[in-house]
Image: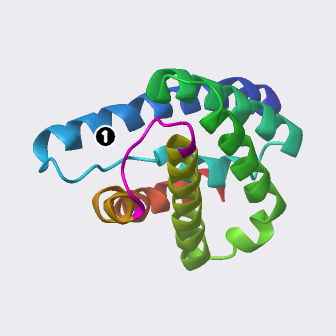
Amino acid sequence: MRDIKEHLLTPIILFFVLLIDGQISTFLANILPLQWHLVSHFIFIFMLFVSINLSRNYNILLFCCLGLIYDVYYFHTIGIALILFPLLSLLVCQSSSTMLLNTFTRFLSVLILVFLFELISFAFAVFLNLSSLNLQDFVLSSLVPTILLNSLIFLIFQPIFEKMYL
């Protein structure tokens, strides 16, 4: 019963988390100054904790599907998140014993996941001519605020995830 619940309920929850991420990001874009571009990556916090209970292959397949949805919904192109989500999921699965040791390592893990996703997706966007920002503007207007936002989200929700998954 637990396996059925995890394998059926987890994808549904993660799909809604993708939608919530977009809503949080849109809300913040509407209330903050134009030069800041904050992106919520609640999905990576879930990725860290969900990887404990699911097999590596199922995790990769799940995040491949979510990456495809993310690409279509947010990037309007297929490939960036489709590649990065499963790779980050594989990274989490391979190093979950280290990443989940304590609150501090979980916090750093989320920061690393957000940093890697943002930086690599920016590099892909520049390479594919989807973005004209230079690296300095990207770091100051998007990367740093995004990391700060996701740090705050992690600190708020981490106790809940600990009770649910650890």
Image position of 9 with respect to 48: above or below: above
Left or right placement of residue 39 versus residue 95 in this view: left
Image position of 160 with respect to 64: above or below: below
Front residue of 37/164: it is 37
The percent coordinates of residue 82 (x first, y second) are 67, 33
Please identify the quadrant where the N terminus is shown: top right
Region in magenta: 127-135
Left or right placement of residue 166 versus residue 147 in this view: right
The answer to which quarter of the image holds residue 21 is top left
Front residue of 127/40: it is 127
Task: Indicate the amino acid at tag 1.
Answer: Ser
Residue lying at 74% horizontally and 42% vertically, measured from the top left? 86
Q: Is residue 132 magenta?
A: yes
The percent coordinates of residue 139 (x first, y second) are 37, 64
Residue lying at 31% horizontally and 60% vertically, measured from the top left? 137
Please identify the quadrant where the C terminus is shown: bottom right
Q: Is residue 27 magenta?
A: no
Image position of 20 with respect to 76: above or below: below
Front residue of 163/42: it is 42
Dot 1 lies on which element? Answer: helix
Q: How many marks?
A: 1
Q: Which residue is mark 1?
A: 25
The percent coordinates of residue 84 (x first, y second) are 67, 44
Front residue of 100/136: it is 136
Q: Residues within 10 Å of mark 1 (few under 14, many from 20)?
A: some
Residue lying at 43% horizontally and 28% vertically, measured from the top left? 19
Q: What secondary structure characterizes most of the magenta part?
A: loop
Residue lying at 26% horizontally and 35% vertically, measured from the top left? 26
